[in-house]
Amino acid sequence: MRILLDTHLVLWWLSGDKRMPREADALIADTENEVYVSAASIWEVAIKVALGRMKGDPGAIEAAIIPSGLSELPITGRHAAHVSKLPMHHRDPFDRVLIAQSLVEPMRLLTSDTALARYGELVLLV
């Protein structure tokens, strides 16, 4: 299965956070799955750090992706354009890019954000 991680799951996975759901941990650790981190997640962290809303180092997060067994997914023009086709179930621009990427690629978006479940089967809620 091809899986795109929501930003909070990326942060929890990389830091070994106890909030990481067991099901998500198992899916990420399963070598049969291709697991991706979107450039949008790095961008989201960078903005929140710059605004003082969170602590962290977006560069360190980006540098940890490949060594952690994850793959980076760039944002393409096709991803960006697809955002305009999405219903407004969720207003967060970063989450909307993740949904668009999941649809375009295609892959499942792994998240614990129940609001994203309204986008249908592509969202894997843990």
Image: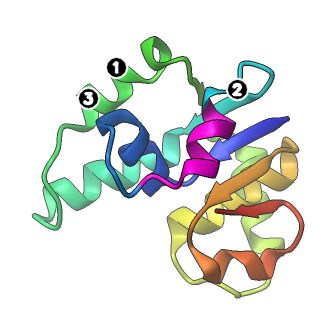
| Secondary structure under the numbered disc 2 in the rendered image | loop
Determine if residue 42 is in view: no
Question: Where is residue 16, by image quadrant?
Answer: top left
- Callouts 3 and 1 close, C-beta under 8 Å: yes
| Label 3 to label 1: alpha-carbon separation | 6 Å
Q: Which residue is mark 1?
A: 63
Please rate how many residues cluster around mark 3, counting C-alpha atoms within 10 Å: few if below 14, some from 14 to 19, many from 20.
few
Q: On screen, 42 above or below 35? A: below
Which secondary structure type mostly characterizes the magenta part of the structure? helix
Of 14 and 65, the residue lying toward us: 14
Residue under circle 3? Answer: 59
Location of residue 8 in the rendering, given as x and y in whole percent from the top left corner: 43, 56
Task: Specify the quadrant that holds the N terminus.
Answer: top right
Residue type, label 3? Gly
Query: Which residue lies at the image location 75% right of the left edge and 58% below the top edge?
Result: 100
**Label 2, on which residue?**
30
